[in-house]
């Protein structure tokens, strides 16, 4: 799915109106129906609902929802109009009149703080005050109304976007002046700002509602931002043929583990095998040999001469893909061996964990990374590589710039893990859950991506498919274990189930 800026979405709306053709007020009706259907599925008809509308088309959505909910048998609907000027937008004014004429629902107007209604914690508030067209923080009466709603402790549903939140960059916005929704019903596409952690408190859970914007208008509108869905991955995963053999699925070399950190090597190598690599060799220190051979018997052991750490690179010729980093530590010997590996590796690598920290500590290493290598930092590791960021939007811009400058693929781990490509495109993941915030989860991801690389997937495909399947395996595991009890081994154990779900989509 493409993700567009708010200005692009307005253009797609206009394109739909012009070419379907459909009147703008009828497009508003579609949006209102989609919201109403969602609310009818989720809430009892005896709930008391207060709908706050603004002067623009977001307010028009609110008038439409009020009318349609009344027609669906919700008797306790109240509408409050934030009166900032004498005029409403044309479509909003029409829908206001429709509501009043057809259902005679009284409308309270808010012209000052004295007009703020009492909101009980048991009420449901629908926020239709301001849409995604805001370009500056809310102040004065609108800001005070939002503070009043937020302080009520009630359930809040935002239509399209929480009022006060901007669609992309919220640097300089005022957090206290933004609606804190429990759920956001957005139209056709998620907003870019929904993917940034600091905005979770405003957006809550979000749902994309299809309002029938024209597919040709969407297709011809370019964007660097994408949202990864199951359908995208089903076409990437390569089927196996009857006469397939292990030599057809690549030989991966994983450089991982050190004395006291062999679990990272175990998790990553197990995941690499589960994701389909034909052969997996694990380069470990001497003291790690027994651990690997007893816990991952399917793996081949490549022994380092050091008893405790990665100190020397093996012959790289036999391998189709190379991954380095999980649990290797940051000793001087490791630093020197990593430098040698970066120089001598003839193909893109998968680089994670301690390898990233060593690269961050020795900036000259960055220029030695093979083009199209896949780097998989978590946010703190990325800060060490690219500098401190102001917020999620700033971090995304730094991520894209880093991938472009160094010609690498940068996988920034977290909720909606993002994959930035050297061409400037970014992909946000749709799978995964908070239970995966546990030690070793990243090692499993490294193994999955390395496996795809060994099997001959293009680096961008390996990163995107790996991120999705890793999250999907976590989603399957969390249904069995729960978020608190989920551990990295559970993710690795469900990689096969993730493949099965993707294949049967």
Image (tube, rainbow, N blue to C red):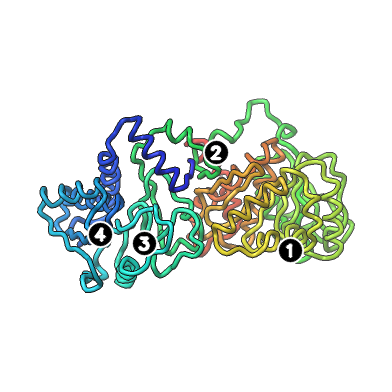
Name the residue located 67 percent from the left edge and 37 percent from the top edge. 458
Q: Pointers 3 and 2 in contact (CB under 8 A)?
A: no
Disc 4 is placed on an element classified as loop
Badge 4 is on which residue?
85
Q: Which residue is mark 3?
A: 181
Secondary structure at badge 1 equals loop
Q: Rounded to the nearest whole Å, what is the CA distance between mark 4 and mark 2? A: 49 Å
The answer to whether any part of residue 106 appears in the image is yes
Residue 402 lies, in percent from the top left, at 68, 52
Q: Earlier in the sequence, mark 4 or mark 3?
A: 4
Q: CA gap, disc 2 to disc 1?
A: 33 Å
Task: Give the camera-side residue of 66 and 502.
Answer: 66
Which disc number belongs to residue 233? 2
Q: Which residue is mark 1?
A: 261
How would you rate the neighbour count of disc 1 (Cα within 10 Å): few for under 14, some for 14-19, many for 20 or more? some
* Mark 1 in CB contact with mark 3 (< 8 angstroms): no
């Amino acid at each position: 799915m493409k993700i567009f800026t708010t200005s692009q979405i307005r253009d797609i709306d206009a394109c739909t109106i012009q070419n379907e053709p459909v009147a703008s007020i009828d497009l508003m009706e579609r949006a209102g129906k989609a919201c109403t259907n969602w609310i009818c599925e989720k809430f009892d008809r005896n709930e008391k609902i207060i709908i706050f509308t603004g002067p623009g088309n977001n307010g028009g959505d609110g008038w439409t929802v009020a009318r349609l909910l009344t027609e669906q048998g919700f008797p306790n609907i109240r509408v409050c109009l934030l009166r900032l000027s004498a005029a409403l937008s044309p479509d909003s004014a029409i829908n206001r009149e429709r509501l009043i004429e057809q259902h005679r629902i009284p409308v309270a107007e808010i012209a000052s703080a004295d007009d703020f209604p009492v909101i009980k914690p048991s009420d449901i508030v629908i926020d239709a005050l301001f849409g995604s067209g805001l370009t500056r923080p809310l102040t004065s009466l609108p800001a005070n109304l939002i503070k009043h709603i937020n302080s009520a402790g009630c359930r809040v549903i935002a239509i399209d976007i929480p009022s006060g939140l901007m669609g992309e960059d919220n640097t300089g916005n005022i957090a206290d002046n933004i609606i804190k929704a429990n759920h956001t019903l957005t139209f056709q596409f998620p907003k870019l700002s929904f993917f940034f952690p600091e905005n979770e408190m405003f957006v809550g859970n979000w749902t994309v509602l299809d309002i029938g914007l024209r597919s040709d208008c969407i297709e011809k509108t370019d964007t660097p931002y994408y949202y990864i869905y199951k359908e995208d991955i089903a076409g990437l995963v390569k089927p196996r043929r009857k006469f397939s053999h292990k030599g057809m699925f690549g030989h991966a070399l994983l450089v991982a583990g050190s004395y006291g950190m062999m679990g990272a090597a175990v998790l990553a190598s197990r995941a690499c095998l589960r994701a389909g690599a034909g052969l997996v060799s694990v380069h470990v220190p001497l003291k790690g040999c027994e651990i690997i051979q007893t816990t991952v018997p399917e793996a081949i052991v490549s022994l380092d001469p050091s008893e405790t750490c990665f100190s020397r690179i093996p012959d790289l010729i036999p391998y189709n893909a190379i991954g380095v980093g999980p649990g290797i530590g940051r000793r001087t010997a490791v630093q020197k061996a990593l430098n040698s590996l970066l120089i001598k590796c003839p193909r893109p690598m998968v680089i994670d964990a301690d390898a990233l920290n060593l690269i961050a500590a020795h900036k000259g290493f960055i220029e030695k990374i093979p083009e199209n290598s896949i780097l998989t930092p978590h946010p703190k590791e990325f800060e060490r590589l690219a500098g401190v960021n102001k917020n999620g939007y700033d971090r995304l811009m730094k991520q894209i710039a880093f991938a472009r400058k160094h010609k690498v693929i940068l996988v920034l781990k977290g909720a909606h893990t993002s994959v930035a490509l050297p061409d400037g495109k970014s992909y946000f993941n749709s799978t995964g859950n908070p239970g995966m915030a546990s030690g070793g989860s990243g090692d499993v991801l490294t193994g999955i991506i390395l496996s795809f690389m060994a099997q001959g997937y293009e680096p961008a495909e390996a990163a995107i498919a790996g991120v999705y399947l890793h999250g999907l395996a976590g989603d399957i595991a969390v249904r069995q274990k729960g978020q608190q009890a989920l551990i990295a081994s559970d993710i690795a154990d469900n990689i096969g189930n993730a493949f099965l779900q993707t294949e049967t989509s």
